[in-house]
Image: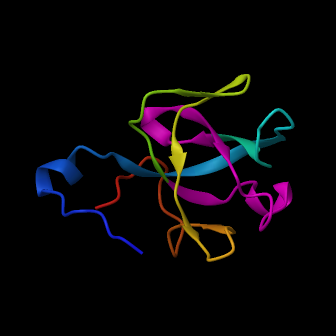
């Protein structure tokens, strides 16, 4: 396994990572890999949508009202007929299953991750 080269603090400071709550989930049959369409409330920065390949670990009921961590300053990315506006972060296991990152206790939506 190769590891990426080091980045600078300035590089990292350009990434906006925030906490949000999943407020709506829909199936995404048009996605190439099984995924959900998530609608996430990030508080003061607003509502964003994301395509997330979480179907192997989570049901829609598992994700509804769950707080998650996401990168919120990527430009929108078209995935099939859907525009994903943020990247939900998770731990990727050796078999490709993704476990979402989340705060260990409830916090206000939109708070930055440092």
In the figure, 52 relative to 107: above or below? Answer: above
**In the current view of this chain or complex, which residue is farthest to the top?**
81
Residue displayed at 76% across by 54% down? 64
In the figure, 46 relative to 38: above or below? Answer: above
Instruction: Give 28 or 41, whichever is nearer the viewer.
Output: 28
Instruction: Give 29 or 49, whichever is nearer the viewer.
Output: 29
Residue 18 picture location, percent across and down: 42, 51
Does residue 9 appear to the left or right of 39 in the view shown?
A: left
Residue displayed at 80% across by 64% down? 56
Residue 85 picture location, percent across and down: 53, 32
Does residue 71 appear to the left or right of 77 in the view shown?
A: left
Which image quadrant is residue 74 in? Answer: top left
Q: Which region of the structure is painted magenta?
A: 40-69
Does residue 76 appear to the left or right of 8 in the view shown?
A: right
Does residue 80 appear to the left or right of 69 in the view shown?
A: right
Residue displayed at 72% across by 27% down? 80
Q: Is residue 62 magenta?
A: yes
Is the N terminus in the top left, top right, bottom left or bottom right quadrant?
Answer: bottom left
Residue 112 picture location, percent across and down: 34, 53
């Amino acid at each position: 396994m190769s590891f990426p080269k080091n980045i600078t603090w300035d590089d990292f400071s350009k990434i906006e990572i925030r906490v949000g709550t999943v407020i709506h989930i829909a199936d995404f049959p048009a996605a190439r890999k099984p995924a959900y369409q998530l609608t996430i409330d990030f508080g003061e920065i607003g509502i964003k949508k994301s395509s997330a390949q979480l179907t192997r670990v989570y049901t829609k009921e598992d994700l509804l009202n769950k707080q998650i961590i996401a990168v919120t300053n990527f430009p929108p990315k078209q995935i099939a007929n859907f525009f994903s506006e943020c990247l939900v972060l998770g731990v990727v296991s050796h078999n490709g299953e993704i476990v979402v990152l989340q705060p260990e206790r409830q916090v206000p939506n939109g708070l930055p991750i440092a």
